[in-house]
Amino acid sequence: MDLQFTPQEEAFRTEVQTFLKDHLPARIASKVKAGQRLTKADQEEWHAILNARGWLANHWPEAYGGPGWGAVEKFIFDTECALAGGPRIVPFGVNMLGPVLIKYGNEQQKAYWLPRILSGEDWWCQGYSEPGAGSDLASVKTTAVRDGDHYVVNGQKTWTTQGQHANMIFCLVRTQREAKAQAGISFLLVDMNSPGVELRPIRTLDGDREVNEVFFTDVRVPVENLVGEENKGWTYAKYLLTYERTGIAGVGFCIAALAKLKVIADKVYKNGKPIAQDPLFGARLARVEIDLENMKTTNLRVIAAVAGGGVPGAESSMLKIRGTEIRQEILSLIRRAMGVHAAPFIEEAQYEGYSDAPVGPAEAATAAANYFNYRKLSIFGGSNEIQKNIISKMILGL
């Protein structure tokens, strides 16, 4: 059942739909709907369009360039944007670092970094995970030693998404080795062009090079790039992760993906009937739609809590778990509907369009690649197993 909106909210939805119709480039929308890879230029173009309208950082306060939306407006925008084929906003600067700077940064940092995030002058990536510190993030070993008015950083980060495009990286670094793990971590902003920074790409299962390793060798970082207090970075890291995990749920993208799945299920035939009428496939399709409807309501509750000044806690973990499971199930069903045609991965079709796929339905060209790529959803941002531990501690006190 669709959510019911007030007349004012319906008017806002019409405004968003009109904006997307007039300003979302058809070339970019067609790539998104086809599951194709976007270039950095594509993403920068869309960010600039949203920023010109004042809608890029739609969860920031108005004082810092946000539109002042409430929970429902943000939900409507995210949903309509996904349905229209709008790209996901690259989250690292806008959705992750921005809220941390607004809450914990000093006035000089806010005045300098926030406008550069909005303008696209800085492209950020995230320096959290390390080879021995993924789900156990408090075990980070990258060090930052104070040397006058600089920190000297040494260590390694991994799974750095879109690091190949970034000129800046926000990092968790260890500034006190003797303290309890969480107590000795700081939050540092590092220029990727600094001497001693080396980036190495990692090729993923779908053939992409979206993630990277980043190595730091005696990298000097100005002390003014420390966010908040030294050794208090774990507090800021947890605050950032609540925004990341809520965003990973991707409610709008789930809605768009489900709509695509329904179209496919009606036009792909099995035993002379649409596969949607197959009892087993139809049952899975119905189950995932029910789960998505439930998640819509939960997502609105969490966003409303944040808009009211709260910080999502266990709720963000719940959304992360259910959202990633739903998206993975939808992609699994799309791949299953393609049958044998999903077997080959035609990399060129990612760039040149479905018409170049040599066999099978149009959707077959990217079905397998997207299925394999998004197996990562339940792992990054804190694996779903870790999220269940967080929920048990925060709600059940275990």
Image (cartoon, rainbow, N blue to C red):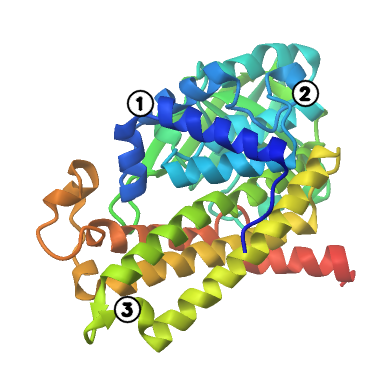
Residue 332 appears at what percent x and percent y? 40, 70
Disc 1 marks which residue? 41
Instruction: Quote the CA–CA distance across marks 1 and 2.
Output: 29 Å
| 347 and 301: which is toward the camera | 301
Mark 1: which amino acid?
A: Ala
Count of residue discs:
3
Q: Amino acid at mark 3?
A: Ile
> How far is mark 2 from mark 3, CA to CA?
53 Å
Determine which quarter of the picture holds residue 218: top right
Mark 3, secondary structure of its residue:
helix
Q: Which residue is mark 2?
A: 105
Q: Which residue is mark 3?
A: 275
Q: Residue at x 58, y 53 (%)?
A: 251
* Residue 73 percent across, percent down from the top left: 68, 38
Up the image or down, 378 lies above or below 57; here it is: below
Report whether 34 appears left or right of 214. Answer: left
